[in-house]
Image (cartoon, rainbow, N blue to C red):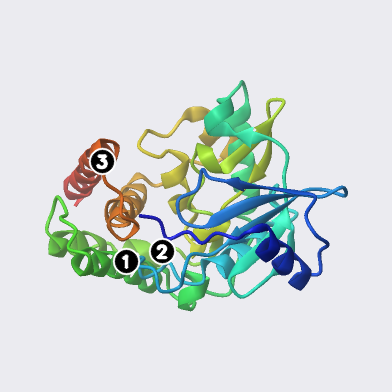
Amino acid sequence: MSNKRQLDRAGLDELLAEAGVGPAASSEELTEGTFNTVYRIGRPDGDLILKLSPDPDAPGLTYEQDLIHTEAEFYRAALGKAPVPEVVHEGEDYLLMTALPGTTLQSAGAGAGVRGELGGIVASLHEVTGTGFGYPQKGLVQRWSEAFLSMVDDVLGDAERYAVRLPRPAEQIWQAALDRKDLLDDVRTPRLIHFDLWDGNVLVEDGRITGLVDGERAFWGDPVAEFVSLSLLSGLDDELLAGYGADVDREKLSLYRVYLYLIMLVEGTPRGYTGARHEGLVKLVESHLLTELGALEQGS
């Protein structure tokens, strides 16, 4: 099952005309993503990327609303601080942006110095501050604890709504987050967080980073949360931290990892993921979730 929407050539040209852009010389659907439909639009004066949101009636997680607009906000806020696409046009359910050079770090692999360069770019990104905490599409609040606890509550509610079995009772997971309200309140400045900087969303070319893409999961929050996807299902590496120029709080990192692992466990059900590969990923994520919950219990 897929929630993606497709455009034929006529529909594509109609949308480009609405955006004030001439017809495409060529178009290619980029199929790596699992949420939006993405096309690369060939044009003589520079390629563009078109991202089309899923059917609004398709099932999804609570926070997965108006992510196109969140992504546009992320790019506008990050421009000049990190290599991100420029927004060409923001429609009601689509985003047109410039195409960046390079291939994903997942495909190319990390050469010498790339992880350190990435750490420096992330440090620059985190210099961008906002007016409140949380997901833009959910409405910003003045305390990070309020924003983050709402995020955890939402995904636990999604687990119940979609009847997703969790490796620990939802009440225990909720309590682990609630017990750290004071720790969360130590975060006083809302900073721009991409929150999906795994290797598939970092572009490289000739051994240098050329882009951070897929900013739709962005929020304003604690910089420590960024390191969850930067070390997805793995440990933090010294080169990344050296480039960033600071260490991260391990207790908060465990808590934010719990949140992302919950998302990874729950989102597969509304998206209709099945098969041995998905089952293997679920087992792996469950194992990491239990590890992080165990770390929080030991630190209590």
208 over 44 or under it: above or below: above
CA separation, marks 1 and 3? Answer: 41 Å
How crowded is the residue under tag 1: few (<14 C-alpha within 10 Å), some, or many (20+)? Answer: few
Image depth: mark 1 or mark 3 in front = 3
Q: Which percent across, then down, holds residue 145?
A: 36, 69
CB under 8 Å between callouts 2 and 1? yes
Report the Cα–Cα distance between label 2 and label 3: 42 Å
Residue 194 appears left or right of 102: left
Badge number at residue 275? 3
Q: Residue furthest left?
A: 169
Residue 239 location, x and y as percent?
54, 28
In the rendered structure, which disc, 1 or 3, sits on the residue that comes first in sequence?
1
Between 136 and 267, which is closer to the camera in this rendering? 267
Quadrant that contains the N terminus: bottom left
Whether residue 248 can be seen here: no
What amino acid is labelled 2 in the image? Asp
For marks 2 and 3, give the one nearer the viewer.
3
Mark 2 and mark 1: Cα distance apart in space: 7 Å
The residue that mark 1 highlights is 182
Disc 3 is placed on an element classified as: loop
* First reached walking from the N terminus: tag 2 or tag 3: 2
Label ID, residue 186: 2
Pinpoint residue 143: horizontal percent, then vertical percent.
43, 74
Three-letter code, disc 3: Gly
Q: 158 or 81: which is nearer to us?
A: 158
Residue at x 61%, y 29% (from the top left corner): 114
Label 2: how many Cα within 10 Å (few below 14, some 14–19, many 20+): few
Which residue lies at the image location 55% right of the left edge and 29% below the top edge? 107
Quarter occupied by residue 179: bottom left
